[in-house]
Amino acid sequence: MNRRDFVQKSLPVLAIAGVALQAGCSQKEAKISQSKKGPIIISTWDNQRANQAALQKLMEGGSVIDAVVAGIKVPEADAADRSVGYGGRPDRSGQVTLDACIMDELGRAGSVSYVKNFAHPIEIARKVMEETPHVMLVGEGAETYAKSQGMEMKNLLTEESKKEFEEWAKTAEYKPKVNIELHDTIGLLVMDQEGKIAGGCSTSGMAYKMEGRVGDSPIIGAGLYIDHEIGGATCTGHGEYVLRTLSTFLVIELMRQGLDVQSACVKAVERVVSHHKHFKPEEIQVGIIAIDIHGNIGAASLVPGFVYAVTDPENSQVNEAVSVQS
């Protein structure tokens, strides 16, 4: 999709399957309503190909977890996506390390962090969830477990990422960029025809991060949270800010207390602001997407520029989230 088509499809900002601006709500807190339940897929950034893969899996009779894995594996395998899986930018030591988590409609969760040489950490996270008594495995332990499950190893550092890293190392200047290339972490939420919700999150983390750094993406309640009684939420952006406020868990709890899904997303982003008194909007982004058990969607970000993809059997499009700093 070219830039002009992207802009056309992104405007108006809230044009997805009907927008309900409820009386008494501000635009930022207006509920975004779906006319039906699933199947519906939502993901951070312009990940329509991931959404389509997830939808296809559902239409073939796969479960919501099958769909989550199928969708997330698309950017994980894409060398052109420089912040997820194969082709991801390395840390300061020159190593590509991956994080991922997954959570199903039953409340089960699996997570892996600091994984090297495996392109699909979402598959390892699923195995942790389904086949072990644990929720999270990290580093060599996660890699040893992946090997025991017959998962294929792969060098994740592409020539393009290697050249960029070598150029960066000349100055080693660390300045994270907001909305870089309109993507980073992929967070993906799936609702099937029965209203079951599951989600996943996968990333290679911030480019040139300190060796051993872990962000929000593999942390249940930060990068992802699912509650079968309420809905699901996932995050993208600067993980440290999400970790300090457990943004996805907060979204679900705000919904439990009675807020609609859009208002809950906005309030969670506002919590990031209120807990970080000296943040610089030009350097920090946090984006949240969520879906409730009725199929209503919410999306909010700290600063403008965060987009998300929405896909159902009739339509797929990209929209820009409401920004609390706009």
Image: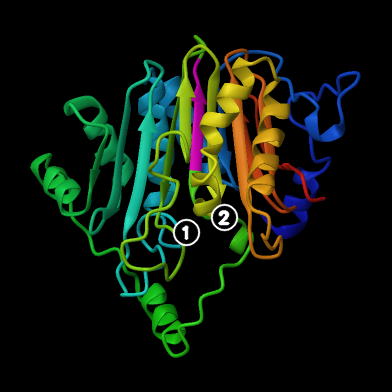
User: Disc 2 residue type?
Assistant: His
Asked whether residue 246 is drawn in magenta, I would say no
Label number found at residue 170? none
Please say if 95 is above or below 99: below
Query: Which mark sits nearer the N-terminus, 2 or 1?
Result: 1
Range of magenta residues: 187-192
Residue 31 located left or right of residue 206: right
Please name the predominant secondary structure of the magenta segment in the image.
strand
Kindly tell me whether residue 297 is visible in this rendering: yes
Q: Residue furthest top?
A: 194
Disc 2 element: loop
The residue lying toward the viewer, choosing from 176 and 1, is 176
For marks 2 and 1, give the CA distance.
8 Å
Q: Residue furthest left?
A: 148
* Contact (Cβ within 8 Å) of mark 2 with mark 1: yes
Q: Image quarter for residue 13? A: top right
Mark 1, Cα crowd under 10 Å, few <14 / some 14-19 / many 20+, is: some
Q: Which residue is mark 1?
A: 81
Q: Residue furthest bottom?
A: 170
Label number found at residue 183? 2
At which x and y percent is residue 98?
33, 54
Please say if 189 is above or below 116: above
At which x and y percent is residue 304?
75, 52
